[in-house]
């Protein structure tokens, strides 16, 4: 972005309406800290009732609840720090355009800017949960959805060809135009945009968009203000609160999930520098599981803030089990989100196996944008590979659904064989029909013919995102459908094959 003068009006409004409500230091006091609550008793009861685990009652678990922040999640902390720095430096003005890639919480936090007259555009994945997507749009940001993973594994990329990248770029251009942006800056940067789309590099894509439109990109995945705010303030908050409760901070271990890695790195830096010891444990869902805003360990590799050498430990946890804990807490009026449930379930397992005794659990957000009912609904709509393989006869129809790709002969053979069905039972929906269905929730006539009037449908796509969206839409239309979690990519990985060699760009 070109250098501009400080927008004093925006800075004044930002400090008055947002910054003053955030945790901050005044003298030796931390003002507006997020609450730290004792969860020891309810966690003990949950472990016993939900998992049949009787824990020794000699532990302490304190929850650091970040949903009380203005943006309703821990991502508000780096978002506000980055925004203030950008305004003060003149890189962000009221007439600026902001572009960022998000899986939910950071984008929702950026939505606070829209109340001050700043236009914000977020690029998100189709796999974004409905409640999170609604919270994003309700916050005022413009949402651009792409049929690619917002959090791709750095070590695994689908090698899209030029035709595919062009189609993705065309869709992106159309969305920007629909949101009132001119296309000339986009077209000037099209070559770079298509190259990044071909590599699924959404993180760099939003930087290019910001540059093309002379806008601002917070760069949450690379901006050092992200971990710094947690080192300089979040960690200090935790320390002060532990001391106020009569505890020695170094006797506790902090457990958090991994999104960008800013929280885990910032907290680790503080306690290593001040107390000379590692106390942060990082939790990930198992590979292939979808936890809002949280990466699996495989997808953390290669990120700027992934620093395992400063962690006390890394732990992979089954989110399917953590969902029981989530429902247990929410049913008792304690608002925790998906990542918080993952963290607390990890602590149950650690206590059960004698790993640690005193913990601070980072509860990054609350249940409000997920909803317990929605979590149960999505659990029914998305099914695992092993579930389908165990009972393929429970489905009367198997349909490939994607808006860009169609499977080639090899893919159809591999999918059919892996699932244990006859190849002719697997049919391919036209990409144009899938796009129409997702756009206006109307079922094209050519697609109606392949849907059974009775019986359950299994939907398959590249990674499970588009097929999940189709399953939700079909459910609203009265059909019973499941989405195959992980899609063709998961099957190809199981079989040691390359999924990029098994699909082609459809002509419609």
Image: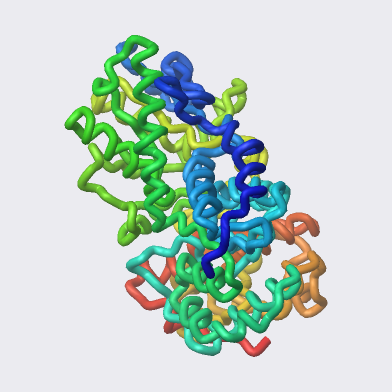
The reply, left or right, for residue 186 in relation to residue 55 is right
Residue 213 figure quarter: bottom right
- At 75% from the left and 61% from the top, the residue drawn is 454
The reply, left or right, for residue 12 in relation to residue 356 is right
The reply, left or right, for residue 417 in relation to residue 432 is left
**Along the line of sight, which residue is nearer the eye, 108 or 361?**
108
**Along the line of sight, which residue is nearer the eye, 218 or 359?**
218
Q: Is residue 90 above or below residue 426?
A: above
- At 67% from the left and 48% from the top, the residue drawn is 9
Residue 190, x across and y down, in percent:
56, 84
Q: Residue furthest left?
A: 276
Q: Is residue 33 above or below residue 446?
A: above
- The colour scheme applied to this rendered structure is rainbow
Residue 206, x across and y down, in percent:
53, 67
- At 56% from the left and 63% from the top, the residue drawn is 4
Residue 196, x across and y down, in percent:
47, 77
Q: Is residue 365 visible?
A: yes
Q: Is residue 251 above or below residue 72?
A: above
Q: Is residue 413 visible?
A: no
Quadrant where the image shows the C terminus = bottom right
Q: Is residue 384 above or below residue 33?
A: below
Residue 159, x across and y down, in percent:
42, 80
The reply, left or right, for residue 310 in relation to residue 13 is left
- At 48% from the left and 30% from the top, the residue drawn is 24
């Amino acid at each position: 972005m070109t250098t501009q003068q400080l927008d004093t009006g925006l800075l004044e409004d930002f400090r008055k309406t947002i910054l003053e409500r955030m945790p901050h230091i005044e003298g030796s006091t931390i003002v507006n800290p997020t609450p730290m609550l004792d969860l020891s008793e309810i966690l003990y009861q949950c472990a016993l009732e939900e998992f049949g685990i009787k824990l020794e009652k000699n532990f302490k678990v304190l929850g650091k609840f970040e949903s009380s922040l203005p943006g309703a999640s821990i991502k508000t902390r780096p978002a506000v720090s980055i925004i203030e720095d950008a305004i003060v430096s003149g890189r962000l003005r009221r007439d600026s355009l902001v572009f960022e890639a998000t899986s939910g919480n950071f984008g929702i936090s950026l939505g606070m800017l829209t109340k001050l007259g700043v236009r914000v555009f977020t690029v998100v994945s189709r796999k974004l949960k409905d409640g999170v997507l609604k919270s994003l749009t309700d916050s005022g940001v413009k949402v651009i959805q792409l049929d690619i993973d917002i959090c791709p594994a750095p070590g695994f990329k689908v090698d899209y060809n030029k035709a595919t990248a062009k189609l993705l770029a065309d869709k992106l251009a159309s969305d920007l135009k629909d949101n009132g942006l001119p296309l000339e800056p986009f077209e000037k940067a099209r070559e770079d945009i298509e190259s990044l789309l071909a590599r699924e590099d959404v993180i760099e894509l939003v930087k290019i968009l910001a540059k093309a439109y002379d806008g601002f990109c917070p760069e949450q995945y690379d901006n050092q203000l992200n971990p710094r705010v947690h080192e300089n303030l979040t960690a200090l908050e935790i320390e002060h609160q532990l001391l106020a409760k009569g505890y020695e901070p170094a006797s506790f271990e902090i457990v958090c999930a991994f999104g960008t890695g800013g929280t885990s790195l910032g907290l680790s830096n503080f306690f290593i520098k001040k107390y000379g010891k590692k106390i942060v444990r990082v939790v990930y869902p198992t590979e292939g599981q979808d936890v809002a805003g949280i990466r699996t360990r495989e997808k953390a590799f290669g990120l700027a803030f992934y620093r395992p050498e400063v962690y006390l430990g890394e732990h992979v946890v089954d989110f399917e089990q953590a969902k029981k804990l989530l429902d247990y807490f929410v049913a008792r009026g304690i608002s925790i989100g998906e990542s918080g449930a993952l963290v607390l379930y990890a602590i149950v397992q650690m206590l059960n196996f004698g790993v640690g005794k005193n913990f601070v659990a980072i509860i990054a957000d609350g249940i409000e944008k997920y909803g317990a009912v929605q979590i149960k609904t999505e659990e029914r709509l998305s099914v695992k590979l092993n579930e389908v393989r165990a009972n393929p006869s429970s489905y009367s129809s198997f349909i490939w659904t994607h808006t860009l790709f169609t499977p080639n002969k090899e893919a159809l053979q591999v999918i059919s064989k892996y699932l244990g069905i006859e190849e002719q039972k697997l049919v391919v929906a036209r990409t144009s029909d899938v796009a129409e269905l997702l756009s206006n929730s109307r079922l094209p006539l050519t697609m109606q013919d392949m849907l059974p009037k009775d019986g359950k449908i299994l939907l398959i796509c590249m990674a499970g995102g588009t097929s999940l969206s189709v399953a939700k839409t079909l459910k609203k239309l009265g059909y019973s459908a499941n989405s195959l979690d992980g899609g063709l990519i998961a099957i190809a990985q199981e079989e040691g094959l390359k999924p990029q060699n098994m699909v082609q760009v459809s002509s419609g």
